[in-house]
Image (cartoon, rainbow, N blue to C red):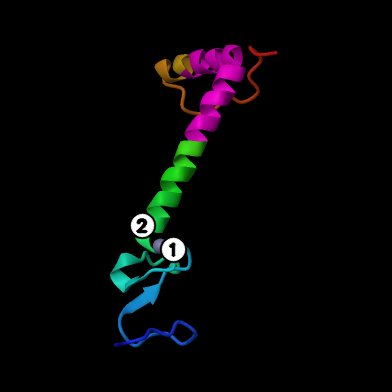
Amino acid sequence: MHEQDNALPAEPPSPSKQCSRCGATKLISAFYSNPSTVCKDCHNKASRFTGACRRAAIARLVSTHIAEYRALLAAERERRQHGQHTMPGGGSDVA
Ligand SMILES: [Zn+2]
């Protein structure tokens, strides 16, 4: 019988560490170098979550301001089609 004691604050000698988010002890290779305290699983989950939230928020923003969005889209398309990648200095076509 081997009882684990997680009360020790010292780092374990093995190349593994505890994820500060899910609490699982994993090999160092299961962690990114930054943030180093969160395992890849948790980090990927968080990234996916953030990405999904952003996409949902943008979709909402677009549907709320669909007219502006279409206008900006058209303007951007026009700008790119004309090969103007730099903003025109002091453009006067938009009020
Ligand atoms: Zn984790």
> What's the residue at 45%, 37% (across, down)?
52
Between marks 2 and 1 in the image, the one whose residue lies nearer the viewer: 1
Question: Which residue extends farthest front?
Answer: 1
Q: Is 72 left, or right, of 30 in this rendering?
A: right
Q: Which residues are magenta?
A: 54-76
Nearest to the observer: residue 85 or residue 28: 28
Q: Is residue 91 above or below residue 21?
A: above
CB at mark 2 closer than 8 A to ligand 1?
yes
Q: Quadrant of the C terminus?
A: top right
Nearest to the observer: residue 2 or residue 87: 2
Q: Circle 2 sits in a helix, a strand or a loop, which is it? A: helix
Q: Distance of mark 2 from mark 1, alpha carbons? A: 9 Å
Q: Amino acid at mark 2?
A: Asp
Q: Earlier in the sequence, mark 2 or mark 1?
A: 1
How far across and down, in percent of the image, does residue 18 sit?
A: 41, 73
Q: Is residue 8 magenta?
A: no
How far across and down, in percent of the image, does residue 20 sit?
A: 48, 68
Q: Circle 1 sits in a helix, a strand or a loop, which is it? A: loop
> What's the residue at 43%, 85% (across, down)?
5
Question: Are the two marked residues, 2 and 1, in contact with CB atoms closer than 8 angstroms?
Answer: yes
Q: Is residue 65 magenta?
A: yes
Q: Which mark is residue 41?
A: 2
The residue identified by callout 1 is 22
Q: Amino acid at mark 1?
A: Cys
How far across and down, in percent of the image, does residue 3 sit?
A: 36, 86
